[in-house]
Image: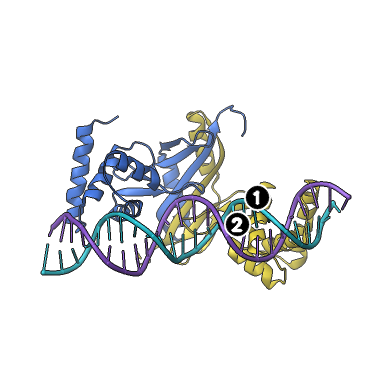
Chain colours: A blue, B yellow, C cyan, D purple
Amino acid sequence: MLHDGFMENRASQLEQALRRAGVRVTRQRAALLRVIAASEDHPDAAELHRRAEAAGAGVSLATVYRTLTTLQTQGVIDKLEFQGEPARWEAADQRHHDHMIDLDTGEVMEFTNDRIERLQAEIAAEMGYDIVHHRLELYVRRRGSPGA
Amino acid sequence: MLHDGFMENRASQLEQALRRAGVRVTRQRAALLRVIAASEDHPDAAELHRRAEAAGAGVSLATVYRTLTTLQTQGVIDKLEFQGEPARWEAADQRHHDHMIDLDTGEVMEFTNDRIERLQAEIAAEMGYDIVHHRLELYVRRRGSPGA
DNA sequence: ATAGATGCAAACGGTTTGCAGTGTT
DNA sequence: AACACTGCAAACCGTTTGCATCTAT
């Protein structure tokens, strides 16, 4: 768990960057930035709204949605769309990774594998394409656990 | 392009299997089975409905949705959920493959890579999990084409 | 001062569902 | 004959949007 000072710092760095990009840093956006920086899981819009409200932010759900789109466009956050569930979000500052979803608990884990990344690029190249982005998700169950 | 006799045959094989599984083969389901067998692309529910109607089937959209769910449960078709677009469907009889989506044309291509499959299984195993299913999608652009 | 952001409530779009009637087994 | 299936229309749910009002720059 990262300490408050660190996240606070992270959030204000981002504010500077946003202002530089000509994006206004409103009370609502600043609050969401902090909620996201403090989140180590993968919350959806409704959950982020709840957390912002819990922090006394006063933000409408519509603004949460608009802000998420804005932050994504600015490259500050990434959107995750797992099997039919509402979209989830994560801070984009981390190194690239893929996701593994435990079907029984809903837990989302992260992993990376350079060889898979390389193979993907090779496959696309062989067919004459460049990869713009990709999505690799493993839907799993604990080894030896009884099927649903 | 596969000939009609082949697809017709495929479809009636499936009907037998469904009946054996205790699923009633109604006029609507038979029609959809044929439309799906004849589709070499990755149509969504609305498109399948259109094709069924064009074939003179007389099926409601609600039934198309219910039938797709039923056929998926029976393992006859697979559901594809690409970036935010409506779900698409494909016959499940083929060997496993992943998808590559051309961002400029919307074209969906299929590919397989055993090494990637093996690496995925290894990663899950290392973390103590079994893969139930996975999703690998490459969003690509023709090499050398101008960015959007 | 002014372009851009917000809140509200209404609309959206794909998908699901309750119910009364129909058709497959 | 029984019970699964269908059509219709209404509901659903996550997300987007029009508009009047506010606010960061």
Residue at position x 68%, y 55% in the image? B67
Residue B20 visible here? yes
Q: Quadrant of residue C20?
A: bottom right
Residue A102: horizontal and vertical position, in percent?
50, 35
- Residue at horizontal 19 percent and vertical 51 percent from the top: A17
Position of residue B89 measured from the top left corner of the image (x, y, whole percent): 60, 57
Residue A94 visible in the current orientation? no
Q: Earlier in the sequence, mark 2 or mark 1?
A: 1
Could you say where residue B20 lies in the image, as x and y percent from the top left?
Answer: 80, 47
> Residue shown at 71%/68% (left/top)?
B58
Q: Split into 4 quadrants, where in the image is the N terminus of chain A?
A: top left
Q: Residue at label 2?
A: B89
Q: Do the residues labelled 2 and 1 touch (CB within 8 Å)?
A: yes
Q: Pointer 2: residues within 10 angstroms few (<14), some, or many (20+)?
A: many
The subunit carrying tag 2 is B
Q: Which of the pair A41/C5 is nearer the observer?
A: C5
Distance (Cα) linking label 2 and label 1: 9 Å
Name the image quarter holding residue A97. top left
**Amino acid under label 2?**
Trp
**Kind of residue at badge 1:** Gln
The tally of labels here is: 2
Q: Is residue A9 above or below residue B10?
A: above
Element on which disc 2 rests: strand
Tell me the element at label 1. helix
Question: Residue drawn at (47%, 67%), measured in percent from left and top?
Answer: B105
Q: Name the residue under label 1.
A: B72
